[in-house]
């Protein structure tokens, strides 16, 4: 896991001491607790705009080609959400029926 660069001097040599981030170059210290709050606030929505949460069952609304493979997840394939991450796409860490675990973009699924 890599730490974010220092917000003051942009140093990459930031290290973490419990909930504090410390920059050795400019001695700036800041808390990571705010970031944790943000993680709880972000929301990921499916193709219909329904809020998705861990444990939800979803189905694919279109055929999804799996990167670096000839495999395709067919429309209607069921999956369950194991983890949700923030991002523009591939927000859903899903267990996909017949295909295993993979990251899927929220707008390509529909909550069941
Ligand atoms: Zn710094």
Image (cartoon, helix red, strand yellow):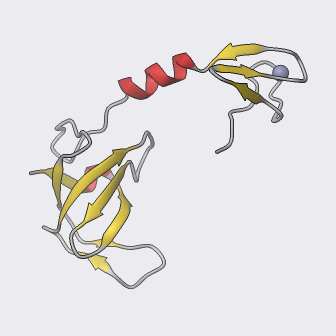
Residue at image point 31% right, 57% down: 94
Q: Is residue 33 left or right of residue 6?
A: left
Q: Position of residue 62 (x, y in %)?
A: 21, 66
Q: Is residue 53 left or right of residue 30?
A: left
Q: Position of residue 8 (x, y in %)?
A: 78, 18
Q: Nearer the viewer, residue 63 or 86?
A: 86
Q: Is residue 35 above or below residue 108?
A: above
Q: Is residue 66 above or below residue 42?
A: below
Q: Position of residue 46 (x, y in %)?
A: 22, 45
Residue at image point 15% right, 43% down: 48
Based on the displayed image, in which of its 4 quarters is residue 25 positioned? top right
Q: Is residue 6 above or below residue 51?
A: above
Q: Is residue 16 left or right of residue 93?
A: right
Give the number of callouts.
0
Which residue is the extreme one toward the right? 25
Residue at image point 43% right, 39% down: 86
Q: Nearer the viewer, residue 11 or 49?
A: 11
Which residue is the extreme one toward the left? 112
Q: Position of residue 73 (x, y in %)?
A: 26, 73
Residue at image point 43% right, 44% down: 88
């Amino acid at each position: 896991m890599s730490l974010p660069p220092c917000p003051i001097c942009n140093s990459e040599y930031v290290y973490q001491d419990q909930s504090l981030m410390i920059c050795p170059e400019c001695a700036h210290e800041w808390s990571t607790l705010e970031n944790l709050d943000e993680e709880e606030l972000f929301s990921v929505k499916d193709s219909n705009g329904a809020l998705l949460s861990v444990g939800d069952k979803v189905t694919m609304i279109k055929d999804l080609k799996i990167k670096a493979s000839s495999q395709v997840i067919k429309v209607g394939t069921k999956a369950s959400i194991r983890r949700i991450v923030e991002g523009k796409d591939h927000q859903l860490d899903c267990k996909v029926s017949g295909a295993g675990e993979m990251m899927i973009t929220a707008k390509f699924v529909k909550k069941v």
